[in-house]
Amino acid sequence: MGLYLFWGEDDFAMNEAIATLKSTILDENWVQFNYDQIPGDSPDNVIQALNQAMTPPFGMGGRLVWLEETTLFQQCSDALLQELQRTLPHLPPTSTLLFSCRKKPDGRNKATKLLQKHADIREFSLIPPWNTDAILKKVRQQVQEKGLRLTPKAVQVLAESVGNDTRFLYGELEKLRLYSEGSPHPLDENAIARLVVANTQNSLQLAAAIRDGKTPQALGLVSDLLNRNEPALRIVATLIGQFRTWLIVKLMMESGERDEKAIASAADISNPKRIYFLRKEVQSLPSAKLLATLPLFLDLELSLKRGADPLETLERKVVELCAVCRSEYLP
């Protein structure tokens, strides 16, 4: 018997794990008889999945029943809970039942508590793009699992290029594996720069470039974002939100506050662990400079709403914002 609960927003990683389950459990010649993928959006479908899981497989291999995107672990009626309690402990050894959902299961939910006793629960959450340490750790782990040889700097460049995009990471690792096959030397950062297309030209990177006063890099990111049809006002909204968060964190730091929960509450951040990274990001930037960027952002937003050319307006204001954040500028 196999009982699994997969949850999280990293669809690619979850689907890879499900594909592994299928290849392990099912005989390829009997897949059409022994594999069921059932939407988990109705009580009737839940009952159908439980009944299918109790049915012995036909022919060779085992049976796999996948109840996809179920809401059981957010809200479960007493009737469905009773069916789960009656069925799950008695699944036949030839059957595997898989529940999946994007949203984190509610720990107070009785169905969740039941699965915690009987199931293999796996999380497939995307790493937040700001958590660069966790992204680097994941990339390093995947490089090792694929048997690739990369220098430490090459791993760093790869992590910066792929960000938290799991699908992109897997594709690039396969490309690097084919390229390095038979080579006795590890790939260095120059090889990564040639072979891997940077996929993290996002508004948070633009905010970081502006914060660090890197005008050429920031202008390049503006061009990349607009070429990828990212709406200019959405870019500006992300920038304003990021600089506002940095400013609040910096002001709290300068006031002597050390409690991460208090800082997170003031900055309207749900995860206090993020404060550690935000502190590092604004450590060398005084609050006066962050304050000086806000009128420029507001002027940028107003210009765009009045119909100004997005590329020209963003480029002009980005140059001004980078100047504000560079050390030679004194507000």
Image (cartoon, rainbow, N blue to C red):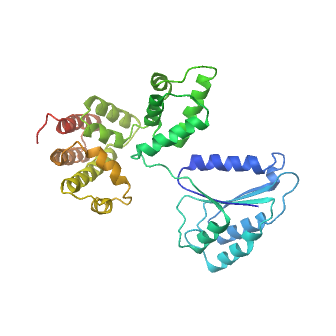
In the displayed structure image, the side of residue 292 where residue 185 appears, left or right: right
> Count of labels shown?
0
Q: Can residue 10 be seen in this view?
A: yes
Which residue is at 33% across, 30% downward?
Answer: 220
Which residue is at 63% across, 46% downward?
Answer: 16
Query: In the displayed image of the protein, which residue is found farthest to the bottom?
Result: 78
Which quadrant of the figure contains the C terminus? top left
* Residue 306 image position (x, y, % from top left): 22, 46
Q: Nearer the viewer, residue 13 or 253?
A: 253
Which quadrant of the figure contains the N terminus? bottom right
> Considering only vertical position in the picture, is 196 above or below 103?
above
> Considering only vertical position in the picture, is 257 above or below 155?
below
Which residue is at 30% across, 44% downward?
Answer: 281
* Residue 260 image position (x, y, % from top left): 32, 59
Q: Nearer the viewer, residue 237 or 284?
A: 284
* Residue 297 image position (x, y, % from top left): 22, 46
> Considering only vertical position in the picture, is 8 above or below 166?
below
Query: In the displayed image of the protein, which residue is found farthest to the left?
Result: 331
In the displayed structure image, the side of residue 33 where residue 150 appears, left or right: left
* Residue 48 image position (x, y, % from top left): 73, 67
Q: Which of 253 and 228 is in front in this view?
A: 253
Q: Can residue 309 be seen in this view?
A: no
Residue 97, picture quadrant = bottom right
In the displayed structure image, the side of residue 90 where residue 106 appears, left or right: left
